[in-house]
Image (cartoon, helix red, strand yellow):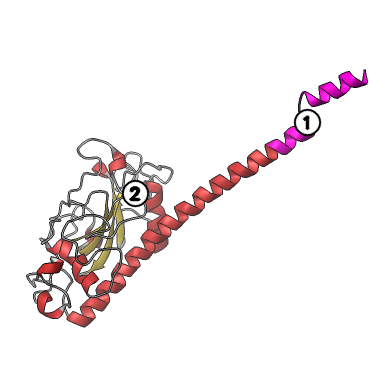
Amino acid sequence: MAMKSESKRKGGFTLVELSIVMIIIGLLIGGILKGAELIENSRLNTVIATTKQITSAYNTFWDSYRGKPGDLAYARTMIPGCNDQSSCVNGNGNQKVGAEVGNPWSDIVSTIGSENTQFWKHLALADLIGGVNPSASEVGWGKTHIESPIAGGFQITTTRGSGGYASVAGLTILTRSRDDGQWLCGVATGNFEECSLSPNQAFRIDNKLDDGHAQSGKIAAISMSFRNGCGTPNTGINGPKGYNEGNSVKSCDMFFWLAP
């Protein structure tokens, strides 16, 4: 009888042992979820910090050169290292970076010689930003444009701010998934993972830096047809602030007003 009892104990787990195992599993799952949350917060904080760094770099450049990076007419004379070897060129000096577009989501020219790309090169050669290669001759995230830790990277445009986004009219920082200047945030294929941020991420950034509304303030956001997570309040799946805060699909791009 004693041998049978001992055999039974060896053949399975007791309730205490199972409880310990479940506690360990719960702690592991909790640790993984907490780790994922910390990573997500770190990525969002990096996006926020990057926009602040770009703003600071722009203001310093303006104070130093009395012109806008990318648009500076005498960049080759004034900026050290701005030459053929670094694929750096002069702007036209019209106080606009690139061709002015009607909306902040409009396509922009993103070739190596465009003012929209030279904006980053002028800042980098002036030693005001990191995250790009000052001598890059090929357009790409982490080469000519600062890369985002979430998806895509940062671009620059000059916009009249129509389409309900008048508050971001002027020189505007953009988050985009593509480096070729096209805005295809779900437009061509309906695949919203082509965008740079989820509505939840966009709302958290907007709420921390601005007013938390997708279509007002100096920071705004948009998704396809204004209704797929970011844009007009209470349109489609958008909430009263214009964000579908529970949506984690990358269906949004954001705009950050930089200067007139």
Please identify the quarter of the rendering in which residue 229 is found: top left
Residue 186 position in % (x across, y down):
25, 40
Relative to 6, does residue 216 appear above or below in the rendering? below
Residue occupying the point 74% across, 35% down:
19
Residue furthest out toward the front: 3
Q: Where the C terminus falls, by quadrant?
A: bottom left
Residue indicated by mark 2: 197
> For the magenta stretch, what is the residue range?
1-21
Residue occupying the point 82% across, 21% down:
8
- Residue 48, can we see it? yes
Q: In the image, 42: left or right of 56?
A: right
As measured in the structure, the alpha-carbon distance from the residue carrying label 1 to the one carrying label 2 is 46 Å
Relative to 104, does residue 115 appear above or below in the rendering? below
- Residue 210, can we see it? no
Residue indicated by mark 1: 15
Mark 1 or mark 2: which is in front? 1
| Circle 1 crowding by C-alpha within 10 Å: few under 14, some 14–19, many from 20 | few
Q: Amino acid at mark 1?
A: Leu
Of residues 167 and 96, the one drawn nearer to the viewer in this rendering: 96
| Number of on-image labels | 2
Q: Check disc 2 and report its element: helix, strand or loop.
A: loop
Check if residue 9 falls in the magenta segment: yes
Of residues 125 and 26, the one drawn nearer to the viewer in this rendering: 125
Residue 122 position in % (x across, y down):
19, 70
Q: Amino acid at mark 2?
A: Leu
> Do the CB atoms of the residues marked 1 and 2 lie less than 8 Å apart?
no
Q: Check disc 1 and report its element: helix, strand or loop.
A: helix
